[in-house]
Image (cartoon, rainbow, N blue to C red):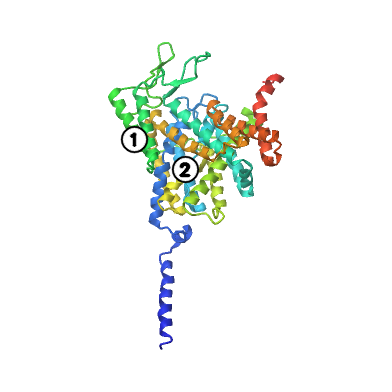
């Protein structure tokens, strides 16, 4: 007995210890691997809430970017002619597509990544595509881009293209788009304005305010919103951008109620020309809404033309547009997945995310779904890191976030009370966040620093994201070739550079040949 007693005492606790972790494991736990990733249902729910409140601003911001820009034909999304009329439609569709895709990411990808219309990508669609074609054609470009990326994921080619682009140029694209968004924010808020008739040699194209100084209550509201949002972001407050938009909107409503500022454009005067109030609100006049909840209008879903862009701008230009959006989608997603995955300790020893193919597949389908929903390409959001910081490790958190986006559809009427002055501080702050990628550019290596510089400055200066990317790629290949460093130029970079040369030379060649 003395021999076997210690054995019995030793073996019994081991048996009990091994049985303990198996008790709470159910179907939900097994499917999402909650216990395996050392999480709990409570943490996943908190993480899903944190992610939504961190990125929920997109339901407000996306309509103000793509819902306020007229296309080549002078039409707004939904074939509307009145500025701002399509905002509630875009808000509802933005929430719908984001909700469905985030649910898909949670259920199929099984990681705490949320999806929505990509900032920067929507700027490309609004200011590069819609300016030369109809909105239906532009959204068709987005659908095609999503289908191409989906094929590249299925064939494994996506990683090959990712490796072909120098890291510094990838960072430069993000930085350039950040500056572009910041410029849009300042101009749309009236903080920086164009100078009427500024064509003389002594003139500058932009100035501070309408007269070289800041005037009017709306401008003051913008300054308040910018300072508030930057302070919240600096203090790393969860949902800082959304809090900034909502708080500034409340202040704008109070200011309008007290000062009766009125709209910037008061409509046509006796002579038929618009009567401008330079100190008025730039888009919406903030006021307490008639209703908060309403049935979402999803009329924009399916409003796209798959191949209309090829007839409108030509095959070469259309292919370059597809490539431009695809490029931004490529690197934004892969950087986000790796960055958020690392923060949540979800990567393996080689720094890869297990099962990343499913994540990239949902993300690629999201690009096409965003175009089909007329809300621009949807992509994985870096704000998912907020949920990971709250302990989220599985797709259950994304299910929570996706359901909240679907609920947000019914609050689309609230978007129509947000003036540019309350929303554009978010554009400036998002611009800053994108510009921080400049730290990854090696400025001592002129072979990549000069192309990166051209990429960054030409986006805001030429008011075109496509021009910035094209200049960067062409100059990179030209410099490397001039220095006989051919081995450092990936074959795909040659192809991309040639396409951009054709893009830039198309109009001059047409002019020389007399082709209209």
Q: Is residue 243 left or right of residue 172?
A: left
Residue 134 seen in the figure: no
Q: Position of residue 352 (x, y in %)?
A: 56, 53
Local crowd size for mark 2, using a 10 Å CA cut-off: few (<14), some (14–19), many (≥20): many
Residue at the spot 55% in from the left edge and 54% down from the top edge: 355
Q: Nearer the viewer, residue 151 or 459?
A: 459
Q: Is residue 217 above or below residue 427?
A: above
Which picture quadrant has residue 286? Answer: top left
Q: Position of residue 153 (x, y in %)?
A: 60, 47
The quadrant in which the C terminus is found is: top right
Q: Which residue is denoted by mark 2 in the rendering?
A: 98
Q: Which residue lies most toward the bottom here?
A: 1
Q: Which mark is residue 483?
A: none
Between 176 and 79, the one lying in front of the other is 176
Residue 7, placed above or below residue 371: below
Q: Quadrant of the N terminus?
A: bottom left
Disc 1/disc 2 C-alpha distance (Å): 24 Å
For the residues bearing labels 1 and 2, Cβ distance under 8 angstroms? no
Helix, strand or loop status at disc 1: helix
Query: Which label's residue is closer to the chain start, 1 or 2?
Result: 2
Residue 201 in the image: state x and y as whole percent: 53, 14
Instruction: Determine the residue positioned at 62% across, 44% down.
Output: 163
SS type, badge 2: helix
Is 233 placed left or right of 75 in the picture?
Answer: left
| Quadrant assignment, res 218 | top left
Where residue 405 appears, as percent x and y from the top left, is 42, 44
User: Mark 1 against mark 2, which lies toward the viewer?
Assistant: 1
Would residue 280 appear left or right of 342 to someone viewing this image?
A: left
Mark 1 — residue? Answer: 247
């Amino acid at each position: 007995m003395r021999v076997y007693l210690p054995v019995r005492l030793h073996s019994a606790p081991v048996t009990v210890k091994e049985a303990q972790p198996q008790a709470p494991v159910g179907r939900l736990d097994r499917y999402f691997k909650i216990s395996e990733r050392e999480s709990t249902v409570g943490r996943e729910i908190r993480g899903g809430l944190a992610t939504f409140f961190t990125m929920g601003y997109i339901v407000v911001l996306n309509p103000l970017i793509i819902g306020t820009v007229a296309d080549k034909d002078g039409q707004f999304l939904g074939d509307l002619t009145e500025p701002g009329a399509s905002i509630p439609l875009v808000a509802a569709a933005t929430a719908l597509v984001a909700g469905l895709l985030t649910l898909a990411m949670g259920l199929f990808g099984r990681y705490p990544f949320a999806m929505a219309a990509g900032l920067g990508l929507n700027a490309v669609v609004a200011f590069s595509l819609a300016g030369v074609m109809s909105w239906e054609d532009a959204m068709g470009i987005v659908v095609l881009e999503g289908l191409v990326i989906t094929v590249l994921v299925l064939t494994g080619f996506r990683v090959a293209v990712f490796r072909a682009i120098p890291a510094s140029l990838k960072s430069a694209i993000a930085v350039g788009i950040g500056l572009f968004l910041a410029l849009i924010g300042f101009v749309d808020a009236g903080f920086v304005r164009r100078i009427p008739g500024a064509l003389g040699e002594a003139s500058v194209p932009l100035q501070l305010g309408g007269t070289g100084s800041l005037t009017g209550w709306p401008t003051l509201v913008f300054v308040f919103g910018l300072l508030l949002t930057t302070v919240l972001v600096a203090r790393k407050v969860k949902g800082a951008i959304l809090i900034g938009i909502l708080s500034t909107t409340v202040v704008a409503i109070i200011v309008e109620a007290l000062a009766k500022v009125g709209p910037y454009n008061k409509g046509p005067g006796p002579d038929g020309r618009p009567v401008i109030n330079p100190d008025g609100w730039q888009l919406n006049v903030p006021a307490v809404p008639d209703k908060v909840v309403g049935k979402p209008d999803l009329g924009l879903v399916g409003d796209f033309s798959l191949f209309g862009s090829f007839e409108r701008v030509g095959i070469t230009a259309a292919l370059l547009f597809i490539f431009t959006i695809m490029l931004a989608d490529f690197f934004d997603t892969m950087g986000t997945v790796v960055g958020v995955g690392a923060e949540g300790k979800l990567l393996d020893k080689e720094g890869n995310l297990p099962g990343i193919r499913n994540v990239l597949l949902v993300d690629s389908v999201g690009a096409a779904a965003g175009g089909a929903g007329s809300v621009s390409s949807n992509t994985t959001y870096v704000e998912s890191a907020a949920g990971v910081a709250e302990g989220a490790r599985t797709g259950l958190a994304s299910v929570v976030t996706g359901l909240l986006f679907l609920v947000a559809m019914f609050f689309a009427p609230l978007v129509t009370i947000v003036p540019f002055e309350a929303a554009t501080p978010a554009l400036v702050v998002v611009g800053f966040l994108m510009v921080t990628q400049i730290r990854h550019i090696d400025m001592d290596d002129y072979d990549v620093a000069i192309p990166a510089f051209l990429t960054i400055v030409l986006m805001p200066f030429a008011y075109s994201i496509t021009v910035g990317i094209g200049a960067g790629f062409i100059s990179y290949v030209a410099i490397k070739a001039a220095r006989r460093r051919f081995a450092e130029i990936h074959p795909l970079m040659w192809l991309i550079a040639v396409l951009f040369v054709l893009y830039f030379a198309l109009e001059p060649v047409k002019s020389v040949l007399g082709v209209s």
